[in-house]
Image (cartoon, grey):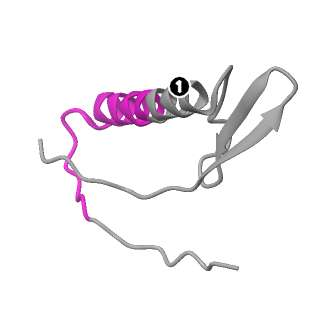
């Protein structure tokens, strides 16, 4: 299977016990860590798990069906 790449915006907040991280474009994908590096590593792993689980669910739902797959692009405004 061909592997693609997507760019997302990770945000890290300093908290009393380390850092909290989240991805602006993926609701519900959040992490925390004692250091920003720990929060970053966890966030990257969680995002990969989310995409893997979604892909697996789609494959199961579409198994044996005639489907059309295509790439598309979404413009993301920057402030």
Which residue was labeled with disc 1?
42
Q: Position of residue 72 (x, y in %)?
A: 35, 70
Residue in the foreground of this view, choosing between 50 and 66: 50
Which residue shows up at 75% across the image and 25% down it? 18
Which residue shows up at 43% across the image and 27% down it? 49
Q: Is residue 46 above or below residue 74?
A: above
- 64 part of magenta stretch: yes
Which residue shows up at 46% across the image and 34% down it? 44
Q: Secondary structure at mark 1?
A: helix
Q: Is residue 35 above or below residue 75?
A: above
Residue in the foreground of this view, choosing between 62 and 22: 22
Residue 59 placement, left or right of 32: left
Quadrant where the N terminus lies?
A: top left
- 7 part of magenta stretch: no
Residue in the foreground of this view, choosing between 29 and 56: 29
Which residue shows up at 81% across the image and 20% down it? 17
Residue 41 placement, left or right of 16: left
């Amino acid at each position: 299977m061909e592997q693609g790449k997507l760019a997302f915006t990770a945000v890290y907040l300093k908290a009393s016990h380390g850092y909290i991280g989240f991805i602006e474009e993926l609701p519900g994908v959040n992490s925390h860590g004692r250091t920003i590096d720990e929060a970053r590593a966890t966030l990257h792993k969680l995002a990969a798990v989310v995409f893997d689980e979604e892909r697996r669910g789609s494959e199961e739902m579409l198994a044996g069906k005639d489907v059309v797959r295509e790439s598309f692009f979404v413009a993301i405004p920057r402030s």
